[in-house]
Image: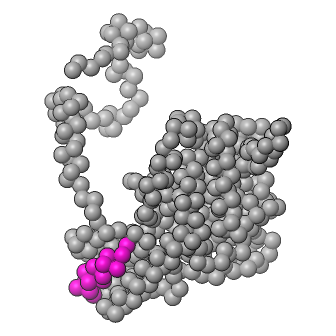
Amino acid sequence: MENFLSHTDEDRAQMLDVVGVKSADELFNVIPEAAKMPDLPLGEAISEFAASKKIKVLADSNKVDYLNFMGGGAYSRYIPAAVSAVTSRFEFLSAYTPYQPEVSQGTLQAMYEFQTYIARICGADVSNSSVYDGATACAEALLASVRINKIPSVWVDKNINPNYLEVIKTYLWAQDIKLAIGENPEGEYSAKLYQFPNYLGELEEIPAKSGKELIIVAVDIFALALCEPPEADFIVGDFGSCGLPVNFGGPYGGFIACKDAHKRQLAGRIIGKTIDKDGNPAFCLTLSAREQHIRREKATSNICSNQAHCALTACVYLSLLGENGFKKVAKKSYDNAHNLAQKLVAAGYEIENKNFFQEFVLKLSKVSADEFLSKMEDNGILAGIKLDDTRVLVTTTEILDNEDIEKYAECAKSLV
């Protein structure tokens, strides 16, 4: 089978002449020579069919059957088959749908339902219909607080997800907003940001306000199935574990919920329910303070995509679980974590946490974190995330059973 060549030599010569260069190579002169790889060993050209067979052989060499005890913001959960059956329908899945969901009543309704789920889970007055991820949600809530309180300074708890913190630093740097990180905040701030549970898995009580600062809490929404939502002006988080696969680092999706007084400072979209001219229920884009709409430079966010299809997926997932299923998933995750922690303590390990949901810090004494994780991996277990040389963050979700927990504990016992 011969490949179709869209451009002839004459076509290329004409385009190069219009651009004003003599050869295609000249187009790439701006790239430093050190960055080029002229001797890249690509091998001989092969057909598409042969390439497919070769790729399959390479793919078959991957190991994909590990028991997964990793988390830190990215959680493996069971995804019902009905989720993709609904979200992959052509009415929802098109190139343009995630970018402009306001063109479709069906997508608008899904966004409205998504907002309702998030607001109910978080105990908030209003929610937006998503942003990129949990890190973005944290940053956007901090920017909103500065617009409200007019103080170009914010404080972030030291135990926040480090990946969130890197995104926050970038956002605040671009806006000339000072960032303080620590344990005991002193000074005047527009906002204080906490995480519940924190990155180390601890369920800490969120301190009350000490001034006019706004309280922002980044939550794991599954923890809110078992715990009362924290008292906060903004509750933000990542819904990536709601029906979205981990998939080499995403996709994720973020939400921002808040008190009614702050709704006009929300980034992204807010969908409303109304009545059309015939008296029938209808959904519409109620607030959308993006730069491509009327706000221009006064926009609360310049995010052009609100992860609409990811939010749709989360909406379908949550609707399939229902309130009871949502609580069961959270309870199973909690039980697995506490069961594993008890077995590890019995084996001679120390658990750093006092009060945790589905993640805890395992302290090591006889081996380093690298050696521990390597030997556990040799036994088919992704045992956690290295925090430092002597500590590992261990996570359990509902996809693990008692046999999986027992295998982790038995393998770890030989390394204590």
- Magenta region includes residue 401: yes
Task: Specify the quadrant of the image occupied by residue 91.
Answer: top right
Q: Is residue 408 left or right of residue 76?
A: left
Residue under the point 27% across and 79% down: 407
* Quadrant (top left/top right/bottom left/bottom right) for the N terminus: top left
Residue 46 position, x and y percent, is 18, 29
Q: Is residue 357 left or right of residue 266?
A: left
Name the residue at the left extreme.
44
Give the overall secondary structure of the magenta segment. Answer: helix
Identify whether 25 is placed above or below 321: above
Asked whether 210 or 272 is in front, the reply is: 272
Q: Is residue 177 left or right of residue 310?
A: right
Residue 259 position, x and y percent, is 77, 64
Asked whether 99 or 102 is in front, the reply is: 102
Highlighted range, magenta: 400-416
Identify whether 42 is placed above or below 120: above
Residue 315 position, x and y percent, is 58, 55
Residue under the point 55% across and 55% down: 316
Residue 338 position, x and y percent, is 44, 84
* Quadrant (top left/top right/bottom left/bottom right) for the C terminus: bottom left
Identify whether 179 is placed above or below 288: below
Residue under the point 22% across and 72% down: 379
- Magenta region includes residue 356: no
Q: Is residue 411 left or right of residue 219?
A: left
Q: How many marks?
A: 0
